[in-house]
Image (cartoon, grey):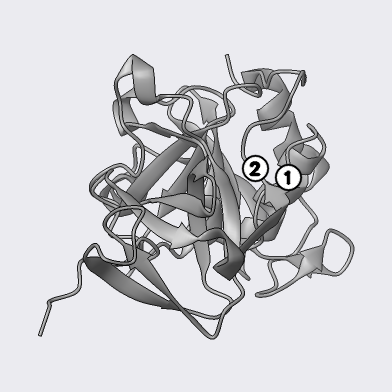
């Protein structure tokens, strides 16, 4: 029996999802949703090629290329898998790269901590009035810049240019995997100067924290930059 390769959505993000060389930086892609009951991800644009894995209905995959009746899926090891276009819906065009949007600056980001200081943390919440979780907060801030992000922190981390911890700039999105988890479970926005903004937990809500603190640095899993939103 053929052994399946790692799924793209298992975010063991010790390795970037995006290539670091200049040629590959623009492969930001869009999130596509599998519409078939099951859909095979092939090694090449042919049903006679090998199969990487079989994706189930409603699974989100990162589409970075279109070629006729095929869509190219970015794999965790930065290679491409191929899915039949009829088996995946990319009409929503959920992207992490906007058009001409106002860039983030440190002072503005830190000021947001004061603006939203009374917003409580509520798991699954999406309203600043009744409470939000970490990914909803990040999504709201970016929506104000005209950038639409996926709802969950795991899906948000699939889009954008990969940024190493030491290369973070104001406006970069930061993602963490706490409690020994192999998948992302927290999100925030880097403000510069070793500080980041996040909707932290039920006790503190929206606040600033030091990303250089061992708790956060050790749990850091991914940095993502939306080219049009950061400088």
Tell me where residue 32 sits by quadrant.
Answer: bottom right
Residue 27 appears in view: yes
Circles 1 and 2, Cβ within 8 Å, touching? The answer is yes
Residue 200 appears in view: no
Q: Please state which of residues 95 and 171 is positioned toward the viewer in this rendering.
A: 95
Q: Is residue 186 above or below residue 142?
A: below
Q: Is residue 204 above or below residue 79?
A: below
Separation of marks 1 and 2 at Cα, in angstroms: 6 Å
Tell me where residue 125 sits by quadrant.
Answer: bottom right
Residue at the image position 54 percent from the left and 86 percent from the top? 37
Q: Is residue 81 above or below residue 178?
A: above
Kindly report which numbered mark, 1 or 2, lies closer to the viewer in this rendering: 2
Q: Which residue is mark 2?
A: 95
**The C terminus lies in which quarter of the figure?**
top right
* Dot label at residue 148: 1
Q: Position of residue 130 (x, y in %)?
A: 86, 69
Residue at the image position 55 percent from the left and 52 percent from the top? 156
Q: Is residue 197 above or below residue 180?
A: above
Q: Position of residue 83 (x, y in %)?
A: 44, 61
Tell me where residue 146 sits by quadrant.
Answer: top right
Crowding at dot 2, Cα within 10 Å, few <14 / some 14-19 / many 20+, comes out as many
Q: Is residue 96 left or right of residue 159?
A: right
Q: Please state which of residues 91 and 59 is positioned toward the viewer in this rendering.
A: 91
């Amino acid at each position: 029996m053929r052994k399946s390769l790692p799924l793209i959505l298992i975010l063991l993000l010790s390795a970037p999802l995006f290539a670091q060389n200049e040629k590959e930086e623009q492969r930001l892609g869009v999130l596509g949703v599998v519409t078939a009951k099951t859909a095979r991800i092939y090694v090449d644009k042919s049903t006679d090629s090998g199969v990487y894995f079989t994706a189930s209905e409603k699974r989100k995959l990162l589409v970075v290329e279109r070629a006729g009746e095929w869509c190219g899926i970015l794999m965790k090891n930065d290679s491409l898998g191929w899915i039949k276009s009829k088996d995946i819906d990319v009409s929503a065009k959920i992207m992490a790269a906007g058009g001409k949007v106002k860039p983030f600056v440190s002072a503005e980001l830190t000021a947001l901590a004061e603006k939203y200081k009374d917003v409580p943390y509520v798991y699954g919440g999406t309203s600043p009035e009744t409470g939000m979780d970490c990914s909803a907060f990040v999504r709201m801030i970016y929506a104000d810049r005209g950038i639409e992000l996926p709802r969950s922190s795991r899906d948000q981390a699939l889009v954008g240019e990969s940024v190493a911890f030491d290369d973070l700039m104001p406006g970069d999105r930061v993602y963490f995997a706490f409690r020994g988890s192999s998948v992302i479970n927290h999100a925030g926005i880097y403000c510069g100067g070793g500080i980041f903004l996040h909707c932290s937990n039920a006790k503190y809500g929206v606040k600033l924290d030091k990303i250089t603190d061992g708790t956060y640095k050790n749990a850091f899993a991914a940095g993502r930059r939306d080219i049009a939103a950061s400088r």
